[in-house]
Image (cartoon, rainbow, N blue to C red):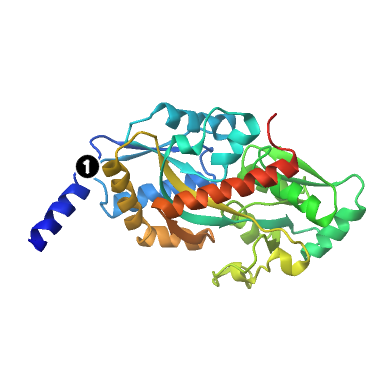
Amino acid sequence: MAAAAAVISGTAAAAWEPSRPIEIIVPFPPGGSSDQMARTIQAAIQKNNLVKQPIIILNKPAAAGGEAMMEIQKSAGDPHKLITTSSGIYMTPLATKLPVNWRDFTPVAMLAQDDFVLWVNAQKPYRTAKDFIEAAKSASPPLKTGGNGSKREDNLLSVYMEQQAGIKLTYIPYQGGGPASVQLAGGHIEANMNNPAEEVANWRAGSSRPLCVFANKRMSYTAKIAGDMSWADIPPCPEQGLNVTYQMLRGMFMPGKVTAEQQLFYVDLFKKIVETPEWKEYLERNALVPDFRSGPDFVKFLEEDEARHKDLMTKAGFIAN
């Protein structure tokens, strides 16, 4: 009887499978960190034969990711669509009054969290966060920072730094972390707050320099990246007198109104994906913090993270009236 029950339970859990290609919608341009995550997932699925149907990546970056979110909202009941998510899942609606909310979707899983780093042009004299803050205090006009769009994570970090350090900065929005990295390497801005994936190439090339990571502890990756430095060698910003910490979720959602069996299929799929060599190599290459959550644990995280972002955005004046 126990064996029969196990067979019945397993059959029920595996009863639904995709019947046509699966679309992963990325609310950012090709080449960015969210796009890299989606393509890593695609490769892991294909190389390990985890799904019978093909995986299609669709980039829909318009309206700060709002186009992609509206697409998922309009696709309620369609279990063949997924969307990669970051903090923009709350920030874009709060900043724009976009009539969409993550509660309109079906949470599948959080896969990792992304640290952010304070980067400067390698030709500049700043060696520590304290050096940068002291220069910012006396700069006239204010030092320029840049990042991924307006009223998004990078912009929020720039304002957060102003508030915590008592400085004034000029923030310049670009069309992604990649363009912000190019502008930093060219000396057109003094600093950016990029995540590791979007700045590592210029760090290796000697064009940029990390000053500190916006976290309470060092990153865990010890392989040498640039010269004799690893990700673990970058000090936390609070250790350098800049009391600013921030991490960004990386996860996956489905449209709303899908069945529990359809949701479970993808939860189980992502449990398998995070155990693949492709995913583990991706985490280390991009210095991501492994953090898998699904079900109530993921929902609880989303509720708390949304509240924190709403508080930070209110203080920054980013909430749409």
Nearest the camera: 5 or 138? 5
Coordinates of residue 302 in the picture (x, y in percent): 51, 48
Q: Is residue 222 above or below residue 131?
A: below
Relative side of 108 to 198, left or right: left
Residue at x-position 92% and y-position 54%: 138
Residue 186 appears in the figure: no
Quickly name the residue at label 1: 16
Q: Residues within 10 Å of mark 1 (few under 14, many from 20)?
A: some
Coordinates of residue 1 in the picture (x, y in percent): 7, 61
Residue at x-position 68% and y-position 31%: 320
Q: Quadrant of residue 223?
A: bottom right
Relative side of 319 to 53, left or right: right
Name the amino acid, label 1: Trp
Relative side of 88 to 298, left or right: right
Relative side of 71 to 92, left or right: left
Coordinates of residue 296 in the picture (x, y in percent): 42, 52
Residue at x-position 51% and y-position 39%: 30
